Image: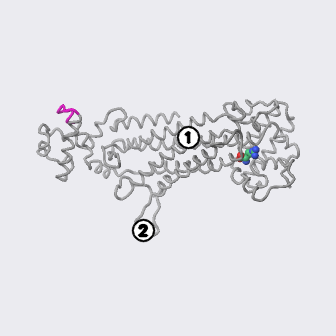
Amino acid sequence: MSNRMWGGRFAEGPDAIMEEINASIDFDQKLYKQDIAGSQAHVRMLAEQGIVSSDDAEKIVSGLNTILSEIEAGTFKFSRALEDIHMNIEARLAELIGPTAGRLHTARSRNDQVATDFRLWVRDTLDNLEDQLTELLQALCEKAETHAGDVMPGFTHLQSAQPVTFGHHMMAYVEMFARDRSRVQDARARMNESPLGCAALAGTSFPIDREMTAKALGFDRPTANSLDGVSDRDFVLEALSDASICAMHLSRLAEEIVIWCSAQFNFIKLSDKFSTGSSIMPQKKNPDAAELVRAKTGRIYGALNALLVMMKGLPLTYSKDMQEDKEQAFDALPNLSLALAAMTGMVRDMEPNTKVMKKAAGSGYSTATDLADWCVRVLGMPFRDAHHVTGALVAKAVEKNVELHKLSLEDMQSVEPNITDDVYSVLSVDKSVRSRVSYGGTSPANVRKQARRWLKQLERD
Ligand code: ARG
């Protein structure tokens, strides 16, 4: 039997394989709420404009409400033969209210319908991501405030570089995730235009009111070009780009958590709630949640890439290729949401081992820069000369197998005779971090100030 929605010119029904490759109902049923809201806004507008009678519109609206309850109760029967969520719902509407159902699709096409539904879904998802990012930011700021003065090694090349504070390290991620959040807000603002009423591609001869449907669905305005309206997928690409950058940030923090809770580093205790054991090695406590957050990045980048490649080279306007957009987003964005929730939990629960971190911060000649700065400040040396002298002092410490602050004054003076024992006052890690008062630097006072500023800001947002 040919298809009732579009089969007028068809003598035969589709091959079984055709049905399988063509049907999207297995995944796009996720859009049922958005589809029903879009249809109700559309038919109310049709009635307002005198294109359908208000009696018919009422019947359609209430039939759609019945369908909504059926889907939510799990009693709705989805059919692959009806391809997608749009036709499944419309077919059921016809069963419920008869031929009047056929009036719903006046001045509309599945092309603008699916673009509308999917935008609504992406918009809700972005709103949810924004809230989750706010929670993660809060957790990071609270950790930072508590540990504003706790010293840890700062690394470059994963080699000890200079002491920093744990709070400062947390606040670095606050800056990253705050940018992610503002990217999500930007994407939402840019995407919030309604394609409904673009119809198949060229607009419609019916006197529709696109402003009205846009407003009813919470869009800022209708899209301005009907060809673009049905064929643009920038909104999901932008969401996936933002998601990819955020996943990259999550993955960097996840990797640090994995390193920090190894026995060799032992910088943090990860809570039992976000770890697992080993079925053979009884001593093990594995950071599985952090590893999975790190891993999620792969599928999120994959989705972005798949969609960029799928869209590339598609001539205007709609092509069925575009049906492939949904599964990618349905996989990537909820996985990002899960990763954000797991990271927020881990950050809240993690306890830095402050003693271990402080000890590690003092090893690896991490205050060498402080020593060079002292030579500049007290001995009046140009920084390049001070750097050279300090390098020689580090070599001396390596030769004697001691840390810099344990190098005797005699040894120091054998390298640079003008050094006095005042130099030891800058060689402790606490002094080092306290001295980094430049704007954005690691001094505990700075960190506290930044954490409080952000916490206040987050309360207002
Ligand atoms: N299921 C389709 C999709 O997801 C809906 C649009 C179909 N439009 C069409 N002209 N075949 O893209």
> For mark 2, does the 10 Å Cα neighbourhood hold few (<14), some (14 to 19), or many (20 or more) residues?
few
Colouring convention used in this rendered image of the protein: one colour
The front one of 279 and 350 is: 279
Residue 205 in which image quadrant: top right
Q: Is residue 163 left or right of residue 231?
A: left
Amino acid carrying label 1: it is Glu
Q: Answer with the quarter of the image where residue 437 lies.
A: top left
Q: Which residue occupies 20% across, 41% down?
A: 390
By secondary structure, the bulk of the magenta-drawn segment is best described as helix
The residue depicted at 48 percent of the width and 34 percent of the height is: 457
Q: Position of residue 238 (x, y in %)?
A: 58, 40
Horizontal placement of 203 versus 381: left or right? right
Mark 2 CB within 8 Å of ligand 1: no
| Quadrant into which the N terminus falls | bottom right
Q: Which mark is residue 281?
A: 2
327 in the magenta segment? no
Q: Name the element at disc 1.
A: helix
- Over which residues does the magenta segment extend? 374-382
- Near-viewer residue (215 or 192): 192
Q: Residue at x 57, y 47 (%)?
A: 305
| Mark 2 residue type | Met
> In the rendering, at what x and y percent does residue 15 appear?
79, 58
Give the number of the disc on residue 130. 1
Disc on the earlier residue, 1 or 2? 1
Q: Is residue 201 above or below residue 295?
A: above
Across and down, in percent, residue 42 comes to: 77, 37
Helix, strand or loop under label 2: loop
Pointer 1 local density, CA inside 10 Å: few below 14, some 14–19, many at least 20? many
Q: Is residue 130 left or right of residue 387?
A: right
